[in-house]
Image (tube, rainbow, N blue to C red):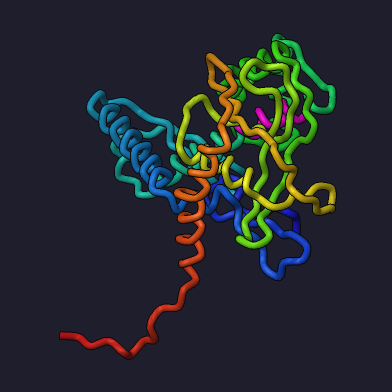
Amino acid sequence: MSLEWGNEGRDEPRFYDIPGYKTPLVSVTTVLRMYGDFFWANIVETRKHVERLAMAHQNKKHVEHWMQDESGWQKSLVPAHVALLDGKHVSQAGLRMLKRSAEKGSLRHHMMEDWSYGVSVHEHEVREWALEKAQDHSYGVDVDEAVPSLVQLNRWLWRWKPKIVMSEARCYHYKLKYAGTFDGVMEVDHPLFQGGMIDLKPDRFERRYIAQVAAYKHSTHLYMDGKKMAMPKGLGAAILMCGDDRCGLRPIGDTLLKEYWNKMFKPALACWKAQSLALPPKGKEVWL
């Protein structure tokens, strides 16, 4: 079993196998699904998709109908009302959106990782680089959708020339039994951030992103190359936000991280663990 496992589209729970633990440790991102904003965001996106279908139906247009099978995603064009009445259409559209978003993020991670190995690309080479990475990793994302944010990240890397001290760093908390992977540790000559823990995100700022970094920051150990080591003390933290038209660094102070750790992540972790609580035995009901 690999160190990290779960659904690649991030629509199912993810876990880590850490030596010394009898059971896998739940991932930080899975824990934060217990927070309402994650579910609300999915509800909002579902509503928007249904509204787009309804508008297309009014205009008598066909829409893309995506379904997943063993060979991958299959596209067809169907009348909007057919898609609207198909119970699987919206769920499949949501699953594809999750996977596309995850794979776009994975391409940004690959670019950061390549930079850490001294492999850089020039702006005119970004699309070709992305096509090669997508093919190597069997990604189904439309590369042209991913290129704009990759270009922005590439510009940021060339502008600030960070030194990636550690890439794809896995961490865990020995007592609270959760684990996760942050994008790395960097040193950079930046006016707002001279170095520390870094995590790549889209260019929108959400509370769960801060809680995610807080969970990484308060982990007790790193697990790298099969070895456990204590989490370094005094490590700074920042989110590198990459969108289609901008890329910027947003440092997060220790005080704010501690607040999110105590008020958001730990309650979410308690909710996750509460799912294993026993229910009352059957046969004890009193029906009126």
Identify which residue is drawn at 72% across, 35% down: 184
Let me know if residue 135 is in the magenta part. Answer: no
Q: Is residue 279 left or right of residue 159?
A: left
Q: x%, y% of residue 54?
A: 26, 32
Residue 133 seen in the figure = no
Q: x%, y% of residue 21?
A: 72, 67
Identify which residue is drawn at 59% across, 30% down: 239
Point out the residue furthest to the bottom here. 283
Point out the residue furthest to the left here. 288
Residue 94 seen in the figure = yes
Task: Using the image as rendered, state which of residue 138 and residue 287 is in the foreground.
Answer: 287
Q: Is residue 118 left or right of residue 49?
A: right
Q: Which residues are magenta?
A: 104-114
Identify which residue is drawn at 71% across, 9% down: 124
Task: Using the image as rendered, state which of residue 64 and residue 220 is in the foreground.
Answer: 220
Please state, as top left, top right, bottom left or bottom right, where the C terminus lies in the image. bottom left
Please state, as top left, top right, bottom left or bottom right, where the N terminus lies in the image. bottom right
| Total count of labels | 0
Identify which residue is drawn at 59% across, 47% down: 215
Magenta highlight: main SS: helix
In the displayed structure, 15 sits above or below 72; it is below
Q: Is residue 264 left or right of residue 228?
A: left
Q: x%, y% of residue 70?
A: 61, 49
Q: Is residue 25 left or right of residue 223?
A: left
Q: x%, y% of residue 274?
A: 46, 67
Task: Using the image as rendered, state which of residue 122 and residue 18 is in the foreground.
Answer: 18
Question: Hey, which quadrant is residue 188 in on the image?
Answer: top right
Question: Hey, which quadrant is residue 247 in on the image?
Answer: top right
Task: Using the image as rendered, state which of residue 210 and residue 167 is in the foreground.
Answer: 210
